[in-house]
Image (cartoon, rainbow, N blue to C red):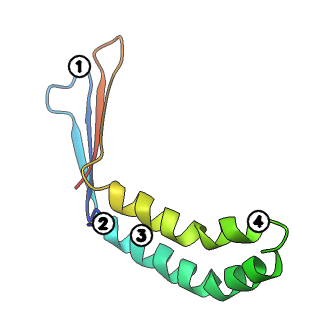
Amino acid sequence: MIPLLMRIDIRGEGRPRGVRLFFPVILAWIVVLALLLAALPFVLVAALATIRRGPGVRLLQLYPALLAVLFSLSGFRVDIASHRDDRVFVSFD
């Protein structure tokens, strides 16, 4: 499933509470999907024009690869700590 929400949690050494931000990334995915659908006819024409020389096959594999990356973002978490005890946590839920 595609991630619908991105959470960013920033905590500093001097700030006990930190900052927590939530972003609805589903809105970004809607825009990206619309752009990908608009570009699809051009990608197909370019792939068919260059299929004999090689890059056409890679162009045809572009859309499934992008969807695989998008769907694999669900559950992705990054936790970064610095030497001064500052912490940044990013999560796709």
Lower position in the chain sequence, tag 3 or tag 4 = 3
Amino acid type, callout 4: Pro
Lower position in the chain sequence, tag 1 or tag 4 = 1
Tally of marks: 4
Residue 41 drawn above or below residue 82: below
- Judge the density around disc 2: few (<14), some (14-19), many (≥20) Cα neighbours within 10 Å: some
Residue labelled with disc 2: 2
For the point 35% across and 62% down, the residue is: 71
Lower position in the chain sequence, tag 3 or tag 2 = 2
Residue 74 drawn above or below residue 36: above
Separation of disc 4 and disc 2 at Cα?
A: 28 Å
Residue labelled with disc 3: 28
At numbered mark 4, what does the secondary structure look like: helix, strand or loop?
helix
Q: Answer left or right for 65 relative to 7.
A: right
Residue labelled with disc 4: 55
Residue 57 drawn above or below residue 49: above
Amino acid type, callout 3: Ala
Residue labelled with disc 1: 14
Determine contact: label 3, label 4, CB under 8 Å.
Answer: no
Quadrant containing the N terminus is bottom left
For the point 20% across and 25% down, the residue is: 15
Amino acid type, callout 1: Gly
At numbered mark 2, what does the secondary structure look like: helix, strand or loop?
loop
Lower position in the chain sequence, tag 2 or tag 1 = 2
Separation of disc 1 and disc 4 at Cα?
A: 53 Å
Residue 11 drawn above or below residue 44: above
